[in-house]
Amino acid sequence: MAVAEKTNVSNAGGAGDTEEKLLLPLPKWKIWYIMVVIFILLFFDFATRVVVGPLFPLIKAEFNLSDAQLGLLNTVTLIMVTVLAMPLSYVIDRWRRGKMMSLMAIVWSLASLVSGLATNFGVLLTGRAALGVAEASYNSGGQTMIMATIKKRRRTTVTGFLYTGMMLGIAGGMALGGVLGAKYGWRNTLLILAVPGLLFGILAWFMPDFKNPAKSAQGAGAGIGAVLKSFVTNKSVMLMVIAYAFVNFLIYTTLSWLPTYLIRYDGMDIAKAGSMAGVVMVTALIAMPIGGWLGDMAARKSARTKILVILLATTIGTIADAFAVLLNFWPLFIVGALGVSTLIPPQQVSLQELVPAHQRASVFGFYYAGIFILGGLWAPFAVGAISDAVDLKTAFWVAIGIAAVAIIVYAFVYKSFNNDYFRARQQEQDAAALQK
């Protein structure tokens, strides 16, 4: 490839690269406005997604449900995320990102209201499905805005800090689900969580945006089939999707079932189990910024060096979870959450770097769909089914084993990264030339 031949491959994306021109240069106060809105909406995106986990015992008692049916409440959300992530992200690449994110926040808040008002399992399941529709491509728009407004040398760090909103939302959702559920019941808990998303969804409508950098047959104007083909033939993108899908299976097992695990194997009540699960997830407040900082430090040598950070974090997280189950020592789940949270910022930025700028929202949608189809989508239901057939501890062992395979896959990403990185830079140049 022309670009690769002219560039020192060992320094791909490293200190030798020139700083690319920002797609959306803004004064600092506008950047802060965008980042604060994204952070808060990330919090409530994931809080409304996971809050149902600590409420499982209350919902189970009212509707007389099996563990598999309880798991389906999270799985149906992920099904909708999976089905709609790519097409909605494709739309984001062609429309106003802030307005799309605003509409999604409002819809997922209304879906939480519907869930809280459910009079039977079918209505509750429908509300959880609607929640997934709204959450399908919010992250695509958010990550694209980061890439457009933040300079290259700080992107992974900023991503790490912003994604503390996601993990804090997970921790907050777990804790609020336990505390509010015990005090006010599961219905009122879901109703309470709906209000903030409505307010900040309105604020997202006013975020500044940028025009798509390419409107050509080879760029953002290409049909969704052509865009999809470009991702499928990108070896590094495909491997990253597969690897994180396996990690995602373990993540969604933990998100959905850790409170129930703590109740069954550690004798905790619902309030304490929700709070302790929240403590496990709140480690992201440390892990996300650390992952971002380590990613940017690694990128000073080369862009693909961030993959080594991902490899190490995946290894630590998987081993820690294995010993947590083996020794029946739940605090080790904290170390596991620390590991899988650390890998997220370099994972997100590396994925964006592997495609041209005009496909960044679309690739995030493709990535989201892939990691759920191959991993997280099935985790809540599959773990519930295994729990019904054997026990919950065995189900956790299955999830840990699947995540361990990701370590091997990430090693192959490291090998293929540079070729795909330079191909993306060449595609950006070609698209820019067609615009002139």
Image (tube, rainbow, N blue to C red):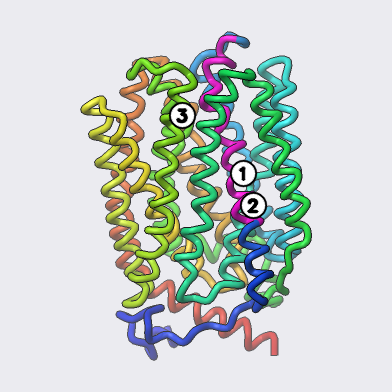
Q: Residues within 10 Å of mark 3 (few under 14, many from 20)?
A: many
**For residue 87: magenta?**
no
Does the rendering let one see residue 238? no
For label 2, the SS is: helix
Mark earlier in primary sequence (3, 1): 1
The residue indicated by pointer 1 is 45
Residue at coordinates 73% horizontally, 38% vertically from top-left? 195
Give left or right: position of 41 versus 307.
right
Magenta: main secondary structure equals helix
Query: Could you tell me which quadrant the C terminus lies in?
Result: bottom right
Q: To which residue does mark 2 refer?
A: 138
- Tell which circle, 2 or 3, labels the residue nearer the N-terminal end: 2
User: Which residue range is magenta in the image?
Assistant: 37-61
Residue drawn 64% across the image and 39% down it: 132
* Residue 57 drawn above or below residue 337: above
> In the image, which disc is placed on residue 275?
3
Q: Is residue 47 visible?
A: yes
The spot of residue 288 in percent (x, y) is: 43, 54
Asked whether disc 1 touches disc 2, contact meaning CB atoms under 8 Å apart, the reply is yes
SS at mark 3 in the image: helix
Residue 113, compared with residue 315, is above or below; it is: above
Residue at 75% in and 43% down: 198
